[in-house]
Structures are given as C-alpha cells and as structure tokens.
Image (spheres, rainbow, N blue to C red):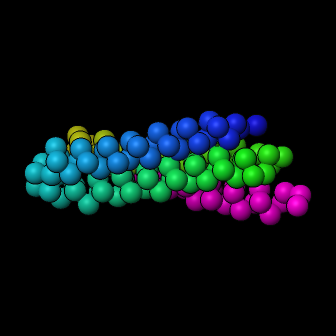
Amino acid sequence: MLSPKTALILGSFLGFLSVALGAFGAHAFKDFLSANQRLATYDTAVQYQMYHSLAILAVGILGLLMPKTDFGWAYWLFLIGILIFSGSLYILCATGIRWMGAITPIGGICFLAGWLSIAWKIYSSPR
C-alpha cells in the first residue's frame, strides 16, 4: 500500500520542479525554443507536470482521508505519466529529437488511467 506521506513528499517535490523548470525555460531557453517553435511545447510539459504533481498531492491527501483505500495505482500512473509525457517533451525541446514526441501520448494515457483509478477506488471503497 502506498504511503500517503510518500505521495505528499513526491507531489511537493515535483511541483517545485515544475516551477523551477518553468522559470528556467522562460529565461534560459526562451530565444532557443522560440526560434525553433518549441516554446509552447515546453510550456505544455511544465503545465502537465504541475497538474499531475498536484494530483499526486491529492492522492496523498486521499490516502490520509481514506486509509483503508489503496491509491497506489493512481500514484504510479501519475508519476510514470510525468516522466514519459513531460520528460519526452523536455527532451524534444532541449535536443530536437523528434521521435520523442511519439512516446508522449503514452504518458497521456497514464494520466487518464490515473484519474480513472482514483474514481474507481473512491467508487468501490466502503463508506
């Protein structure tokens, strides 16, 4: 069973990293990325990382509120989604390796599955 403390710590760290990467990209990559039409892609990576960092925090809070319900699948799906979705877009923007964009949807599917996992766990848990 996933520790709510682990989810809260990781969600907090990933949220911090989203802000740091967003600020870094806005300053260090602005000329490089806008010249190559990739600034919007970088922004998308940062936004989705932040949204799902908050989702991991929510998983931690749900774990505290519903200690008999295991939200581990949602936690792992959000974490893997961040790594694949945002990670592939970061690599694409930093290197221009276009095939990285081909694996991005796998991360998106992980995000979708994570949200459905939360809904299912709440629906199927005892009151």
* Residue 74 seen in the current view: no
| Percent coordinates x, y for residue 74 in the rendering | 65, 49
Provide the major secondary structure of the magenta segment: helix
Q: Residue at x 12, y 48 (%)?
A: 32
* Residue 48 seen in the current view: yes
Left or right side of 27 for 108: right
Left or right side of 16 for 96: left
* Figure label count: 0
Q: Is residue 17 above or below residue 113?
A: above
Q: Which quadrant is home to the C terminus?
A: bottom right
Q: Is residue 126 above or below residue 99?
A: below
The reply to whether the magenta stretch includes residue 116 is yes
Q: Residue at x 14, y 56 (%)?
A: 34
Q: Residue at x 31, y 44 (%)?
A: 21
Indicate the quadrant where residue 126 lies.
Answer: bottom right
| Percent coordinates x, y for residue 101 in the rendering | 35, 51
| Percent coordinates x, y for residue 72 in the rendering | 70, 43
| Percent coordinates x, y for residue 69 in the rendering | 80, 49
Q: What residue range appears in magenta? A: 104-127
Q: Residue at x 79, y 46 (%)?
A: 67
Judging depth in this view, the residue of 80 and 59 nearest the camera is 59
Q: Which quadrant is home to the N terminus?
A: top right
The reply to whether the magenta stretch includes residue 102 is no
Judging depth in this view, the residue of 3 and 90 nearest the camera is 3
